[in-house]
Image (cartoon, helix red, strand yellow):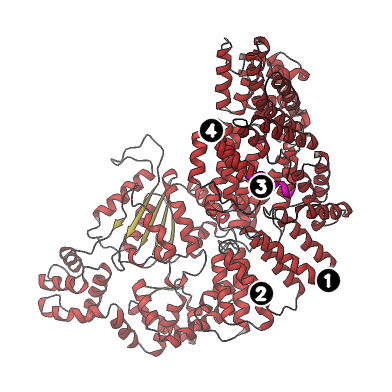
Amino acid sequence: MVQRIVRSKRTLFERESELAAVDEALDELAGLRTDGAEAADRPRGALLAVAGRAGIGKTTLLAEIRRRATARGCTVLSARGGDQEQRVAFHVARQLLQPQFAGSGESDLRASLGSWYDIVGPALGLCAPTAAAPPDPQGLRDGMDWMLTHLAVLRAPMVLVLDDAHWADPESLRWLAAFAPRAEQLPLLVVVAYRPDELPDHAEPLRGLPGRAGGRPLDLEPLSAAAVARLVRETFGPHADDAFCRECWAVTAGSPFETVELIAKVRDRGLTPTENSAHLLRDLAAAVKGSGLVARLERLGASTVRFAWACAVLGTEIHPVLAAAVAGLGHEEAADAADALRGARILTGGETLEFVHPLIATAVYRAIPPGVRVALHGQAAWCVIDAGLGPAAAARHLLETHPEGDPWVVQQLRAAAEQTLRAGAPDAARSYLARALREPPTAEARAAVLYELGSASLLTEPATTVNHLRAALEEPIADADLRHRIVYRLSQVLAHSDRLAEASDTLAREIRVTDDARVKLRMVSEELMWDAFRADEPDHPSRSRRLTKLADRLKGRDLTERYIIGLRAWDATLRGEPAHIALHHAERALDGGLGWTEPDRGFEVPVLVALAFTYADRPGRTEELFAAGIADYERQGWRGAHLSFAYTLLAYVRYRRGRLAEAEDFVRAGLRLAERVGPGTPAHWYAVGILIEVLLARGRLTEATHVGEDYSFCAPFPAAVVFPDAQTVHGELLLARGLTKAAAEELAAAGRRLEPRGMRNPAWCPWQLHLARAEAHETPERAVATALEALARARQYGTPSAVGQALRTVAEVSSGSARVKYLEESVTHLERSPAAYELACALVALGTELRRTGRPREAAEHLYRGLDAAVQCGADGLVESAREELTAAGLRPRRLHSTETDTLTTRERTAANLAAEGLSEAEIAREMQIDEPMAVRLLSAVCRKMGTEITGLPAALRTT
């Protein structure tokens, strides 16, 4: 960017403390101690915030910081906010980052940015937006974080300077305010200057930025009378008398900008710096800003005034040819005007012009008569388009014009909104479309504008989106495809706003009036999908029958048919039909492709199909699908709710596999992403419920309780079906806390909600298993009946993990010798399942029961195996229980692994653990993302170190 010209070869007066802080930060950035010696630790970045009113010297101080940074060999990134550019998305970010890639071709940019190219490139003006769906704002900010971090490391040490941050565009400012605290972990010094009294709402994050290592911002104070006197005598020499210097200070109130301008005017007028001239200073000072500046400008002539107005409308980095076109001046006349404005110290620069100070730019802009100002913005929009700068550059000018029903204005604003939305700035796109709607558009185009406006508001203002889309449907729509897209989008936003019944009703109404068979089938698939998530669906059995008939006759020829087949797989899972039926339909749905980022489609059905494999004891297949889906999300830059769901549900898969530490890591990552999206969203319910489940499995009851309290994880529960079922998890938490009566009531309520809908699969929602445990305290007979009913349902579903878990619960609520029988059968089933945590629980329970019945040797074997499995799962609470039982049996709790397994490498141990779960070499290769020969080599190495054959490896790992 072109930097504003500041005083050269002058001393910065009364800024010693600020410059000392700057020097200290630069020394630390270079890895030096404050005494200049080399530091022992690595270079450390920092954040400096400089606050002060207009004209107080922020720009001059920042110019000195840039000079000192350059002298120390730092890479300097520089940008400035602009009063007229606040509505231009990523204006500041482009100034900072775009010059670092100047002259790079596409291949070089792709090599530099990697997978972020298509995400951050359009936002920074490095490439055109792709035809794919736009990135969500959080994904884009993550990409820009990576980009700046990469540059800071690659071109260290680096100094980033942002002037007039109060005028930065919201998109850039939100990114930079969130990134700035990271500077201390990078070789990066971030310096931000702003006017604290002029911060708009979107700039509020700046107030929280520390000045230096957690301190206050550097507040610049006006110059003292002594400093002003030194400044005057630096120009005029020592003969400038005290009275003259005091008056200079009085009329400028110590403002550095006004003082410098006043001195220049005194010099231009040829005044003698003595007391005799002091009475003239007040009038000269008045000409520096406000009405005095305007009067001075008007004396330069009409053409010059018009050129200055055009420059004020264009903002910063003004191209003289464009300014001349806006002002309606010829080349020579514009050049003369520019010379006159430079001579009057209003403009500076050559090929690119800027105002000498933002105060001058503001005064000139505000002096433009309102009607002329509007006309100039309209002219600027035409000139910007004519210059080939594109609709996005013209849009900020069109926002300042009056509505006149001009189709050209609507066309340009819609084009600008599309470009801006695809670049990742939905807020800016929404402002353009709202203005287009006020133009207004023609009757034929109104529905399309409303649809586009609703789509731009989708992620940030769902309620507003609903209003716009419903209004669009009330307009006469000749384009049937547009009407269908409006219906799909409306049902989607209603569903994501927890208004599933309205989403389903919207589709049902449109189905009745749609003639096109394929469109009707698509709408039926959407209706069936949202009904599948409704907790209040009135007739679930009827929908299941209809879905079954429909899915059975479809061949999966297109995405709509595969979606319906996928919904059939999920419905079979919920209802507890034999698992092989659900798996059959899941594979049918995947045959032909089921992408997670399909345009105008949700991600729900692909996720449901993937999870059907988990409940059917094929979690490896689920994780393959999730890995592909997460990769799709990251390629698209979808790092908000989409990625939160993916990480959260992947955590649930790991939880069901008994990898509790990994599950906790994933769910906490998902929860962090959900918190960035906003509180109370479905992503929150999923993440918090799974986190509570994981913490309970790990034996951390107190922490699970606090999580539930912190996130208000209690009634009212969401209208949408979530998994694990939120009400059931809440009942499980109450049960773990010993509140058996409250737990029984909560779990029975969950059953009353799910039973009429036919959701009877205990593998999906084990409400009956937890209810049986709660009932066992007061009504043991009822508890046994409840557990046996759940066992029958688990046997119908037929997966080893479901049957084994149900058997363990039946044993827990039963009495006498039946307990051992049920537990032995539970262990047998769970050994054939991927549910390592459930197996550990069953082994410890069986060992405990055998010890109590006087069978110590058998008890020891199962307790040691249970301890081994519990440690591998990360189930700390279960580990303690197993050790207590071993102690009670007179046995010494030993470490999990033998000295032989301690010699395994990380990859060998991973392969061994997967083998212990019963996975084949091919499955291990898929799980570890290696080829099968490598998996065999790893297992062979394990066998050599442990002295066993591959066929005996699981037993060798599990035996004592």
User: Horizontal placement of 838 versus 700: left or right?
Assistant: right
- Disc 4/disc 1 C-alpha distance (Å): 58 Å
Q: Is residue 509 above or below residue 557?
A: below
Quadrant of the image occupied by residue 774: top right
Q: Which residue is mark 4?
A: 738
At numbered mark 1, what does the secondary structure look like: helix, strand or loop? loop
- Classified by dominant secondary structure, the portion drawn in magenta counts as helix
User: Horizontal placement of 823 versus 392: left or right?
Assistant: right
Residue 334 in percent (x, y) is at 45, 84
Q: From which residue to which does the magenta span run? A: 749-759
Residue 751 shown in magenta: yes
The residue depicted at 43 percent of the width and 52 percent of the height is 180
- Numbered tag placed on residue 472 in the rendering: 2
Mark 3 vs mark 2: which is more N-terminal?
A: 2
Q: Which residue is mark 1?
A: 515
Residue 537 vs residue 319, the one in the foreground = 537
Mark 4 vs mark 1: which is more N-terminal?
A: 1
At numbered mark 2, what does the secondary structure look like: helix, strand or loop? helix
- Disc 3/disc 4 C-alpha distance (Å): 39 Å
Q: Which residue is mark 3?
A: 630
Q: Is residue 482 above or below residue 149?
A: below
- Disc 4/disc 2 C-alpha distance (Å): 54 Å
Label 1 amino acid?
Asp
